[in-house]
Image (tube, rainbow, N blue to C red):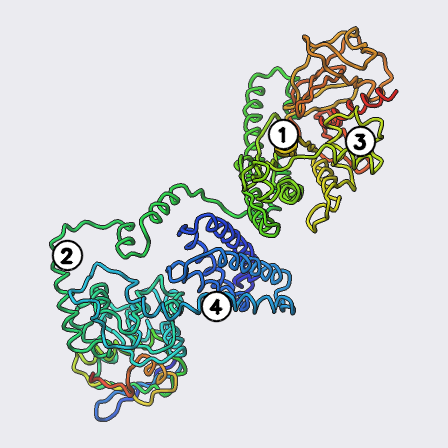
Amino acid sequence: MKIFRRKQDDGKTILKIEGKITINLVKLLKQVLLDFLKKSNRLELDLSGVTRIDTAGFQLIYLIRREANNNNSIFSIVNPAADVERIFKLFGEEMPLTGEN
Amino acid sequence: MDNNEKYNLGDALNIFFTESREMLEDMEACLLALEKDASDENSINAMFRAAHTIKGSSSMFGLSIIEEFTHAVENLLDETRKKTLTINSEIISLLLECHDFILTLLNNFEKQNDYILDDELNNKYSELLEKVKSYSGEKIKVETADSGSVNKHEFESDLNEENHVKNDCWHISLRFGADTFKDGLDPQSFISYLADTGKIVNIETVYDRIPPAPEMDPESCYLGFEINFKGNTTKAKLEDIFDFIKDDCKIRIMPPNSNISEYVALIHDLNEEPMLIGEILKKSGSLTESELEEALKLQHKIENERKDEKTEKPRIGKILIDEQMIQMPVVNAAIERQSNIKKSIRVDAEKLDDLINLVGELVITGSNIKQVSEKSTDGELHDAISSMSRLIDDIRNRTMSVRMVQIGDTFRRFERVVRDLCQKNGKEIDLIIKGGETELDKTLIEKITDPLMHLIRNAVDHGIGTRENRLASGKSGRGTIILNAYHETGSIIIEVSDDGNGINREKIIHKAVELGMLQENKINDITENEITSFMFEPGFSTAEKLTNISGRGVGLDVVKRNIETMKGSVTITSREGEGTKFTIHLPLTLAIIDGFMFAVEDLFYILPLDMVCECAEISNEDIKGMDSGNYINLRGEVLPFLNMREFFSEKGAIPKRQNIIVIEYAKNKIALVVDKLLGEFQTVIKPVGKMFNKLKWISGATILGTGDVALILDVPSLINQIKKYDKEKAVI
């Protein structure tokens, strides 16, 4: 899994995740994402490069979204790859996922 | 993955076959028990579990035919245990057929992993599958309507029974356990599968259990789902989908239009904030606004009532009963069984044999050390060797006992045989088993099964008559066959008796004359024993018509031969009109024996100690013998004797003093005249070469500490020898 960070001029941090978001990587990913969330109050996840995501990954993304909400940060998910769309649909969540409920 | 880590599928597959066969055995026993008592719930539950497990494991190994078939059987059993289908003798017979079929499949797949069913089996498969499905299929409609009330709960609604929710979908509530991911499971596979079997009308993911970020462990699962599902299915089928995860996940399945009390129970059991879960239920479309209100009201009321009760931690038995998941007697039985369960492990038979061989060598070496040490006067040495001998004895006894198996299991297998034969012949026979806990060596058990099978078949076929015949002769309509086993000095006795017609003396005599085995003029001289011994002659059968099981005339002589191969003997006692009893004697000769050694000239011989009654000195006068044969008078008892010097054709000078050893087997006592008595001696029986096959009276040999070879004598054969001598003398 690779994470690419781009900071835009308007203060928004865009994180592009490439590869798998699955059980063996979620522990690491949690730390990374929470760190980024602390540093920036505008976070966007670009999931176009995600090859596979499992329920652990889905759960983690929800956590980040919830934390962002609690901190009054702005959070959004863009360009979900096919597998991401699939799992969100399966679990009854609409895409694209934003910070608002 | 290097080779050490590679999971050895071969081993797992072997275990699967062994365990599946065991489960099928259990299943068969349960079915036979149910025939006698159709209310036996334990048996039904046990069978369900067996079918369920076989289904699951066979799917893991890709044996989809077995999986599919067992699945259908499992459904049928499920209906039975849920009481939506009452078990009757037709169903039991069908299930027995299914059991046999699954066993056949297992055996075939074991021989050839990629086995493909031949036409005959394919037809059988379709035929049985159809029959099974016809039983469970009929009941499906009943199931969906009733299952709302299957989960009776403490929560009784004030509302009358008519208060069912409007929701016409199945409602499935899932709360996955924390270890779900760690156990290698993923909720999405289950939900995905569910979606494939119907339509998920609505799914709400429940996130409330996710703790604050610092404590949240991303590798644990905190998710839950409330699902509204539409599909033509049954509760059992839905439960099946979540089978692999049911130990780790709170699952609740509610059929369409459930009673509102079900939802009250759900809210209560989830133990989450009632308002929140209520909202979710409303959002998912499972409850309407007013239904939700009603449910929350009820739930609240019950909560308060519970707080007033004394809170005592309920024991697991009580919890399970409250949940109505099991009934009282079953719980008690389970708890009792827990305390009685003897732990056992599976052991490779080869390893066991190796171990026993080694123990054998140890015994010999120990004996030799003891012999050599007897020359020494060193007290410490003697003490040490005494301890060592005791330990070796102990090890030997315990190792031997490992190979001992209770004969009860073998006996019980015949229950099915008797049942099937009775159905075929239209007879009614009970099989009574006594002495099932009597143990014999594993190898003997394997060898005795065939002869016993034949004797039992004989009893069903010829021995016991039909119900009408029996009643006509004043007997009970149901016949009885009794299998009995017990120990007796150095042997095990197995009896097969029936209360049937008994042996017709006249018929036997007639047949014997016909076959030329008996001369007409000798008919009156014949003894009871001789009559019955005719039955063991090859080609002898008085059956009027040959059945395809027995009566071909090859039976009893083969039985006798098999038993004699085990160095045993078989006799018949019978009373015409009352019944027949076959008594089988098998010596408990184990590889290691306690022996009694004697010498003739300079050669050594050993007799099994437990067949030795006594020894005494004897004068040459006493053993001169009489005209009528070799007999001695031992304290008033007349004993035939065998002069071992003569027997072994020793030419040397007869010693001044000789000794006798009195041996006994199967109530036959004889005396052996020998030169020297050498005392007790423990040893291992080593086989002698094929050269000695004809010498029936040698059962083995062993090597003494001195390097001499001692021959181990076979007592039953020696006794037979004497009988032969007698016969020969009579002829002269």
Which mark is first along the chain, 1 or 3?
1
Residue B678 position in % (x across, y down): 70, 17
Q: Amino acid at mark 2?
A: Arg
Earlier-in-chain disc, 1 versus 4: 4
Asked if labels 2 and 1 share a chain, the reply is: yes
Q: SS of the residue at dot 1?
A: strand
- Mark 3 and mark 1 on one chain: yes
Residue B388: image location, x then y, percent: 56, 26
Q: In which chain is the residue bearing label 4?
A: B
Near mark 3 (Cα within 10 A), the count class, few <14, some 14-19 or many ≥20, is few
The chain that hosts pointer 3 is B
Is residue B49 something that shows in the picture? no
Alpha carbon separation for disc pair 2 and 3: 84 Å
Of residues B509 and B674, the one drawn nearer to the viewer in this rendering:
B509
- Which residue is disc 4 drawn over? B134
Q: CA distance from mark 2 to mark 1?
A: 66 Å
Q: Name the residue that disc number 1 marks.
A: B491
> In this rendering, which labeled residue sits more in front, label 4 or label 2?
4
Both on one chain, marks 1 and 4?
A: yes
Question: Are the residues flagged by discs 3 and 4 from a single subunit?
Answer: yes
What label does residue B306 carry, if any? Answer: 2
- Mark 2 falls within which chain? B
Relative height, residue B159 to residue B313 (above, below): below
